Image (tube, grey):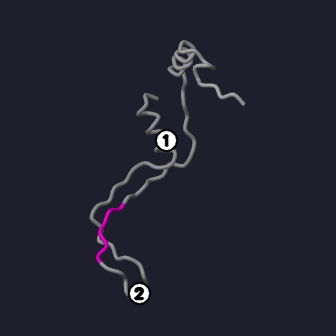
Amino acid sequence: MERKSLKDILSFEEVKRIIKKFEKVKIGVIGDVMLDKYIWGQVKRISPEAPVPVVEILKEDYSLGGAGNVAKNIKSLGG
């Protein structure tokens, strides 16, 4: 089977015309909005009750997750 590149399928002018249509597109995001929590820390020791690390928390951050992250990314692209 012969492989084709994008330029064999679409001309540059056709690509520009398609991209221009994006200005009129409205996007809706459906899904669960989540809050992602990131925890940074340092392992101080191993717990005597179970072989798990005991962590000293140094920093916590929160950011949008799930559909909230998708909507944020679309907005950052001009949507």
Name the residue at 55% across, 14% down.
17
- Residue 70 circle label: 1
Is 27 or 54 nearer to us in this picture?
Answer: 54
Q: Main secondary structure of the magenta part?
A: strand
Extreme residue toward the left, this view: 58
Tag 2: residue type?
Glu
| Quarter of the view holding residue 61 | bottom left
The relative height of residue 43 versus residue 15 in the rendered view (above or below) is: below
Q: Name the mark on residue 54.
A: none
Q: Nearer the viewer, mark 1 or mark 2?
A: 2
Residue 23, given in percent of the width and then of the height, sits at 50, 20
From the viewer's perspective, is 52 left or right of 31? left
- The answer to whether residue 31 is magenta is no
Residue reaching furthest front?
2
Which contiguous range is marked in magenta? 39-44
The mark that comes first in sequence, 1 or 2, is: 2
Quick check: 70 above or below 7?
below
Position above or below: 43 against 64: below
Q: Which mark is residue 49?
A: 2
Residue furthest to the top in view is 13
10 displayed left or right of 74: right
The disc labelled 1 sits on which kind of residue? Val
Q: Residue at x 44, y 39 (%)?
A: 72
Residue that appears at 72% across and 31% down: 1
Q: Position of residue 76 (x, y in %)?
A: 41, 34
Q: Position of residue 19 (x, y in %)?
A: 52, 20
Give neighbour class at mark 1: few <14, some 14-19, many 20+ (Cα, 10 Å). some
Q: Is residue 37 left or right of residue 8?
A: left
Badge 1 element: helix
Image coordinates of residue 37 in percent, x first then y, are: 40, 58
Indicate whether 48 appears above or below 66: below
Q: Which quadrant holds residue 6?
A: top right
